Image (cartoon, coloured by chain):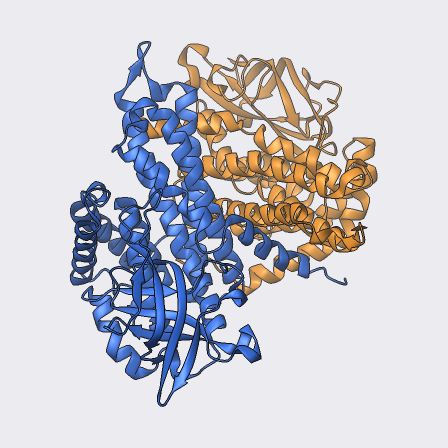
Chain colours: A blue, B orange
Amino acid sequence: MNYQLSADQARLQQDVTAFCADVIASRAKKLEEGVPAERDALMRDSLKRLGKAGWLAAGYGEGGLDHVALYLVGEALARACPATFVSMRSSVHLCAGAIRLFGTPSQKDRYLKGLLGGDSVGALAYSEVQAGSDLGGITAAAQADGNTWLLGGTKDIVVNAPLADVFLVLAWHDRATGPDTGMSLFLVERSAQGPGIVGRVETMGLKGVPIASLSMDRCPSAGILGDNPGQGLSQIRRLMSLGSVGMAALGVGIGTACMEVSTAHAKARSAFGRKIGMYQDVGFKLADMFAYNDLGRMLALRAAWGFNTNDREADTLAACAKLFASEAATKIVNWGMQILAGHGYLAGSTMERLYRDAKFGEICEGTSEMLRQEIARRELDRFEGV
Amino acid sequence: MDFSLTREQELFRDTVYRYGRDEVAPLCEEADLRGEFSFEIWNRLASFGILGLPFPEDLGGSGADIVTCCLAGEALGHAGVDGGSLLAWGAHTYLCAHNIYAFGTEEQKRKYVPKLASGEWIGCMGLTEPGSGSDAASMRATAVKKADAYVLNGTKTFITNAPVSDVFVVFANVDRSRKHEGITAFIVEKGTPGLSTSTPFHKMGCKCSATSEVIMEDCEVPADNVLGGEGKGWIIALSGVEWDRCTLLSPMLGAALFNLDACARYANERHQFGRPIRSFQAIQHRIADMKVFIEAARLAIYRVASAKDRGQMLNPLQAAVSKVYAGDRGFEMASEAVQVFGGYGFMHEYPVERNFRDSKLAAIGGGTSDIMRMIVSRIMMM
């Protein structure tokens, strides 16, 4: 047992943290301002710069995905700019990740270089207005048309939709056999035939993340991911489980950024003759922030290491990490807001932005409630009929 | 980075778990009700070699690493052994015997460690006083040099195992003007004139550990019984913190595992409104929270243990996180376990009731949660 990062891992963490502080952090505020086209251009440029520096490809080695490396890069990016992390994650962890895990050699050749180099942007479109955690309720469907598939239907709240060059779209190819075998992930390239990018939405936090719906009417597909129909739902489940570590990275990154702002304020501001951090009302909040953030990071690294080593507990640990770290983040920003008080409540302040950004984690890709059900079911099943 | 246990560590944990479940846990309910130290439980822990785990074989121990010591604590808690008996073990092995092993002369080690490792002698450590807890440097107990001896005066309180101890490691100041630099540790044997213990306290939980005051009235101790040298007591007292943040917390992690198993089993068996209560989301959410707590607490506790095994200096932030999380969140989770059992959880016959009472100690003993937050916040404010 050894909790320490290896020398290579520690160097990666140090270098990517420095890069993100240098290049990305200053863009966090700009991503909240201006018209969508300006924000999207800035986001695309950030992804390109991350790609050129090699950070998007970190973890994509010869031997399969290195989830510890993905986590370390993710936390550093989320700390510098949560919105950029969320956009990067949809493109790299989810879209490129799925292609890496499930794609055919020619699909990997066609898409991975661009996505991991930052030249193209990817998106994953699975939920719909009426179906989120219960994906059996989706209605998007594909029809065979000669050698190809044509997609119809709409996808709701698709991260990166306004930017993306390539989409993975979950749709029925055979509704009659039911969700476990009747759904596939379809590769879709942006073209004149679709998908239509409609209904761009603005969000409470993570305002720099471009989000819109997909509208598909006889939209041509570039093929089924992996060429083997019927794997869609299990592929999404696998991606969501692996992706829980990334959601934990978002929480820990936000928590770390909030802790920095809060600690700096607690040191700089004095009241009644003492630095406010020396009062227990403030200092103990800093301590709780540290504890929750530290434990969230440990859970995420433990889960990531579990995925790297095919630990059979890894799925449960990843769910625990996502649940813990995203709830820790909302606790931490709440404490941070109390510490910065009026200064934190000002529009345009870092604290105010983090406060809005943090909530995403408890909602996206399985609400905390759904995760608790999933974690509990595994524990309860150990004693079923015993 | 490597979170795995060795095959030997896993086997050992599983063996200890089975022994605890079959041979020790059945005694705990009645012993806890009596509220007294149980020699029967003690002897069963001793006969399995638990009491001497970290000591070398030539001193009667098993040469176990710290992670293995934590696994034993976790396994016994998981098996349903009460927190009091495991606290008695922790105070004996890590705070008394290990201090003699780590800081004692060859003669002191040979005299005390084997008999403590076998359980023939019981040990305790006296640091806390009625007027000083976490602020230990302000202790009032004094030691005055007189020829080849020291004369000790003072009162120690909340001393685990004191009423049943044969060997006392106590701290006193040889020169209070030197503050913590005057603090010195002494080995005092039962029966030394001037050494006495008060009537045991009645505690809220951990009832099978006997706790009392240690009173020293002109208690004359040979100079050979100084542990670690004059003025070295502060370093010895601080070293106890490292054990407190891993091995002494591991039984609390074990108790949480016991509670999770008990609740998950009960939620499958118990039916209300025509369905097992496991189908109610309020029950599911408690089960999930217990699981998350266990995984986070496990990481925090074993991080301290494995760093110690690797010879790294104690990281005060990591140690404090381990203590504050296992203590505060552990108590909340123990309360939720009682809630899952409803009225039955309020009854002594259900071990979740005992674990609830026992779990409160982790937020108090060895530095309260407030002290942990003070440590972390002061470091952050540097």
Q: From the viewer's perspective, is residue A293 above or below residue A225?
A: above
Which quarter of the rendered picture does the C terminus of chain A lie within?
bottom right
Q: Is residue A356 left or right of residue A372?
A: left
Residue at 40% over, 14% down: B178
Viewer-closest of A21 and B92: A21
Q: Position of residue A309 (x, y in %)?
A: 44, 67
Q: Quadrant of residue B128?
A: top right
Q: From the viewer's perspective, is residue A90 above or below residue B277?
A: below
Q: Is residue B63 left or right of residue A113?
A: right
Q: Quadrant of residue A179?
A: bottom right
Q: Is residue A278 left or right of residue B224?
A: left
Residue at 64% over, 25% down: B159
Q: Is residue B324 left or right of residue B315?
A: right
Single out the residue that lies furthest toward the front. Answer: A217
Q: Position of residue B194 (x, y in %)?
A: 67, 15
Residue at 57% over, 80% down: A177
Q: Position of residue B329 (x, y in %)?
A: 56, 37
Q: Quadrant of residue B118?
A: top right
